[in-house]
Image: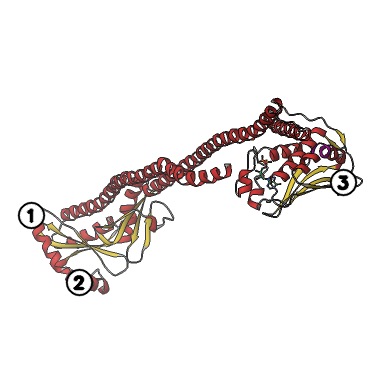
Amino acid sequence: MFFLYNNMQKTKLKISPWLFILFLLIVPSSLYTILELNSMDDQEELYEGIYTNQLDAVLFSLNQFADDNVRAWINDIEKLNWTEGSQERNIKEWISNNPQCEHLLLLDHLNNNTSIDDTLLNEIEKEIKLKELEINKLNSYFNEGYRKVLGYDLNLEHYSLFVFIANLNGQLQQCAIVVDARRFISDILSPRMQRIAGENFVLSIRHVSSSEIVFSTLINTIPESVTEEKVIWLLPDYSIGIQPSGPTIKDVAQKRAYNNILFLVIVDLVLLIGAWFFYRNIRREINLAKIKSDFVSNVSHEIRTPLSLISMYAETLQMNRVKEEDKKHKYYGIIYREAQRLSGIVNNILNFSRIESGKRQFNFSPVDINDILNDVMRNYAYQIENKGFKVDVQLGDDIPLIQGDEEAIGESITNLIDNAIKYSKEIRSIEISTQINGDKVWLNVKDYGIGINSKEQKHIFDKFYRVTKGSLALHAKGSGLGLSIVKYIMHSHKGDIIVKSEENNGSTFSLIFPSNNY
Ligand code: ADP
């Protein structure tokens, strides 16, 4: 009955409580994880936006600085004396004062320039021709009050060309400065970059066509890790890159996301473990409540049967309804047997309760297991044979004395014989034997009854456990305490109880005592 219930409980509880736990605990915390991660993304996007704007502003200010520098040059150029004769000398002097500049040219008089070599001149002419339209617009910009400076890279050395309109002695002239881009970067841009970068950023300049880092505020900068990169307005083949010197926002966000997920996973795990304990406790409580009620009904049933037999036969005898002496004798026998059974049940319950409360005590003394078995058989043989059982007792030779509690061992043997009787069918035969096996003393009780399948064998020594499969097992009376008491007694003797059984082919229970415990 209990087993049946247990199985029913298992299937019932297995699905619903776990679903319940899943919905109540795991789903909300998982939803929270997703929400948290989403809100983190939004925040990070916001920070990332602010951060990128800031980087853009730094790059813009550097470009602006380069532009301002060239405008200052133009102002100086316009102040030069451009009258014939002194013009060449002044230009030379100006160039020597600005070592980043190689040549100062008037585009209308390119061919008159003697200081420039032919290859460079060709390159300049080619570039000017190519950008003619753009350059011609400079005049109209100038007339509208805006002086634009155009920057071109020459495919020669590291030369760049800055083209602009200048007012030379009241005449508007298209001018160009040939600049050594690398010197421009190292002399003009790099000190400024060092100052801006401070400790927070790393600024670097990369030659776009070759991907070579030509300058960095930090030695060994890896260009791949640059967060923002902008082309230098005046040097189109160079770009300024910026990266934070510490971890990037992305790194910080990723670390935080990782920590949050880890934290939530741990919380989920803790919840799951907690839920599992909760579920296990509830299941235990339900099982215990069921066991209690099963136990009460089993025991009441077991007590009621002998009680009603006793009262029925006692009443018949008391009313003098039976005249024949042999019948009377038979009734006395029944009353005695049922009273014995009753006291057996009560003893089992009392023993169990003593074990449970830790009050069961054993009186150990050297005992002969054969003697104890003989005593049990003397008291029991009549009953057993009365039930139609044939008992074969084989006492082993030279069984040594063991240290044991006579009463407890007797009780264990009685329990095993009781079960052998209860769970036998047509073949009513019980074989009991003692033997010495190595340094152990064995007492075996063998029957040819219903047997126990291997799955159940693991549980039959648990308290209250009863097999309820099969009609005999279902109808046999019992409390499920017997074998658990025997197991406790055997363990108290530093021994053990084992079973060898096959369904429908009988069982052999063996009590195993250590012989050297004496
Ligand atoms: P019970 O009071 O039910 O007999 P026990 O603790 O003595 O309780 O036994 C537990 C269960 O083990 C029994 O319900 C029965 O199913 C099974 N069992 C015990 N002894 C035997 C046996 N000799 N043959 C078959 N089954 C047995």
Q: Mark 2: give few (<14), some (14-19) or many (20+) Cα within 10 Å.
A: some
Vertical arrangement, residue 276 with respect to residue 148, above or below: above
Residue 257: in magenta span? no
Magenta part of the chain = 375-380
What residue do we see at 34% from left, 60% from top? 206
Q: Which amino acid type is shown beneath numbered disc 3? A: Leu
The residue wearing badge 1 is: 144
- Whether the residues at callouts 2 and 1 have beta carbons within 8 Å, the answer is no
Tell me, yes or no, if residue 100 can be seen here.
Answer: yes
Q: Quadrant of the N terminus?
A: top right
Vertical arrangement, residue 329 with respect to residue 21, above or below: above
Name the foreground residue: 459 vs 518: 459
Instruction: Find residue 197 and report its horizontal and vertical position in percent.
Output: 35, 47
Mark before the other along the chain sequence, 2 or 1: 2
Instruction: Find residue 298 and report its horizontal and vertical position in percent.
Output: 61, 36
Residue 377: in magenta span? yes
Query: For residue 125, which numbered disc appears in the image?
Result: 2
Image region (quadrant) for ligand 1: top right
Instruction: Find residue 312 and report its horizontal and vertical position in percent.
Output: 66, 30
| Lateral position of residue 104 relative to residue 30, left or right | left
Q: Which amino acid type is shown beneath numbered disc 2? A: Glu
What residue do we see at 70% from left, 52% from top? 426
Name the foreground residue: 362 vs 237: 362
What residue do we see at 30% from left, 60% from top? 238
Q: Nearer the viewer, mark 2 or mark 1?
A: 1
Mark before the other along the chain sequence, 1 or 3: 1
Mark before the other along the chain sequence, 3 or 2: 2
